[in-house]
Image (cartoon, rainbow, N blue to C red):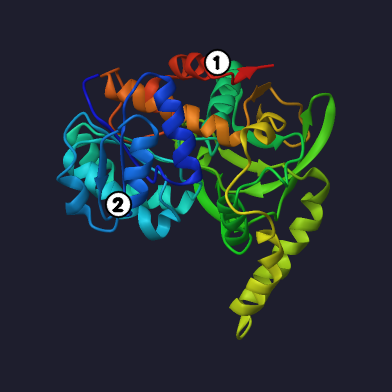
């Protein structure tokens, strides 16, 4: 091991999954956060891990604990509120950086602020390196590569099976609630455009059936056009609740309209409050095992009347389990000095498509 791995937010739900995945790989990460008591108890529970008490809001506080070649993992969100100082510390120190963000706006700003500095310091910065949105980028890249030069558009659909509503964490429900009143980014006519979330509904083939999914944001729209300049369009959809896709489209239109009225913020909050209903924390291992993930990517000429040129399906572990394993895999590679492209980059640009595919296969995310 040539670099230290620091996990910021290890006492939280996602942080716990990442920490356990790292330990299974034989690494001894340092856990970090604001609460001395919680950190000490966590470090003791896992055999005396090193721990750091740091304030994520103060870049200098973090930076003095980081050096070149170290890997900083952060799960502390919402990232629009808490993520930027952490990323600043990593970029300035030349430390590698991985986060579990699902917030595409945060990733866009991260690239604008830190891409050049990270390249100068040799830091590899991997935002949203989990179920959001590594499987979709991998599936899409495989589909576009298979389709060849004729590919002009790619549509990505995220699906899951099993008791999905009971298997959603409190953090995901909060992100879903916020997302219903925010626009979703889409790559269209070779530029980024913002469209109303759920304003589009598309049907995907999933396990021999046609399932509906609604428009959402995804970092596919940021990273895929850089790697495949011929793409005119990249669109991401969520199909966790296929039967609710069209009602949710209407729901997003109502909440969007409400937010533009006088005192509309309160009305929009009331309309989206049902999305928060559920237990705290996240699903346990038994429940996660009942909810595997399925991702579809369809590469096409862009003509909606034409059949896809290539179709790729990936199936793998539960979204939360997969996030923990993906981040641990990437952190281990970076800490041990494996080749990776510096800057704020996507997963295929960082490691290469074939290396990413092999790594995901080791974790159980495979083509079907």
Left or right: 278, with 39 as reference point: right
Expressed as whole percent of the image width and height from the top left, the position of residue 54 reads 25, 51
Which residue does the numbered mark 2 point to in the structure image? Answer: 36
Q: Work out whether 348 lies above or below 146.
A: below
Residue 225 seen by the camera = no
| Circle 1 residues within 10 Å: few <14, some 14–19, many ≥20 | some
Tell me the residue that label 1 is attached to: 361
Mark 2 or mark 1: name the one nearer the start of the chain.
Answer: 2
Picture coordinates of residue 353 (x, y %)? 46, 19
Viewer-nearest residue: 296 or 19: 19
- Relative to 341, does residue 174 appear above or below in the rendering? below
Q: Residue at x 75, y 34 (%)?
A: 161
- State the residue in front, 143 or 302: 143
Query: From the image, which quarter does the C terminus lie in?
Result: top right
Residue occupying the point 78% across, 28% down: 206
Residue 11 can be seen, yes or no: yes
- SS at mark 1 in the image: helix
Does 336 appear above or below 57?
A: above
Depth order, front residue of 337/171? 171
- Cα separation, mark 2 vs mark 1, equals 38 Å
Task: Name the outermost residue toward the bottom.
Answer: 262
Q: Quadrant of residue 334?
A: top left
Q: Looking at the rendering, which quadrant does residue 15 occupy?
A: top left
Task: Give coordinates of residue 195: x percent, y percent.
Answer: 61, 56
Q: Residue at x 37, y 57 (%)?
A: 82
Which quarter shows the N terminus?
Answer: top left
Q: Is residue 158 left or right of residue 85?
A: right
SS category of the residue bearing label 2: helix
Q: Tell me which residue sits at (46%, 53%) in the image.
A: 105
Q: Nearer the viewer, mark 2 or mark 1?
A: 2
Would residue 89 appear left or right of 333 to someone viewing this image? left
Q: Position of residue 250 (x, y in %)?
A: 77, 62
């Amino acid at each position: 091991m040539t670099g230290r791995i620091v996990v910021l937010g290890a006492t939280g739900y996602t942080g716990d999954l990442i920490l356990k995945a790292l330990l299974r790989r034989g690494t001894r990460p340092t856990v970090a956060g604001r609460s001395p008591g919680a950190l000490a108890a966590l470090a003791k529970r896992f055999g005396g891990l090193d721990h750091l008490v740091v304030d994520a809001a103060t870049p200098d506080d973090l930076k003095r604990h980081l050096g070149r070649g170290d890997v900083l993992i952060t799960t502390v969100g919402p990232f629009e509120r808490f993520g930027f100082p952490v990323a600043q510390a990593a970029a300035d120190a030349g430390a590698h950086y991985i986060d579990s963000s699902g917030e595409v706006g945060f990733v866009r700003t991260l690239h604008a602020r830190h891409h050049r500095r990270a390249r100068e310091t040799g830091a590899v910065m991997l935002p949203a390196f989990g179920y959001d949105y590594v499987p979709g980028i991998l599936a899409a890249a495989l589909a576009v590569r298979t389709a060849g030069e004729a590919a002009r558009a790619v549509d990505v659909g995220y699906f899951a099976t099993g008791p999905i509503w009971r298997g959603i964490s409190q953090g995901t429900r909060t992100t879903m609630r916020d997302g219903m009143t925010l626009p979703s980014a889409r790559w269209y006519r070779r530029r980024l455009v913002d469209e109303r979330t759920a304003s589009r509904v598309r049907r995907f083939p999933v396990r021999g059936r046609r399932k509906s999914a609604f428009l959402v944001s995804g970092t596919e729209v940021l990273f895929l056009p850089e790697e495949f300049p011929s793409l005119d369009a990249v669109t991401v959809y969520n199909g966790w609740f296929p039967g609710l896709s069209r009602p949710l489209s209407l729901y997003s239109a109502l909440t969007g309209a409400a937010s533009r009225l006088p005192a509309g913020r309160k009305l929009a909050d009331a309309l989206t409050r049902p999305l928060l209903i559920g237990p705290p924390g996240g699903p346990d291992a038994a429940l996660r095992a009942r909810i595997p993930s399925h991702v579809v990517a369809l590469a096409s000429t862009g003509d909606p009347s034409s059949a896809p040129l290539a179709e790729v399906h990936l199936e793998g572990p539960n979204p939360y389990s997969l996030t923990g394993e993906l981040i641990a895999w990437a952190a281990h590679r970076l800490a041990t000095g494996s080749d990776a492209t510096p800057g704020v980059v996507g997963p295929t640009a960082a490691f290469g498509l074939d290396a990413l595919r092999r790594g995901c296969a080791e974790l159980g995310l495979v083509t079907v």
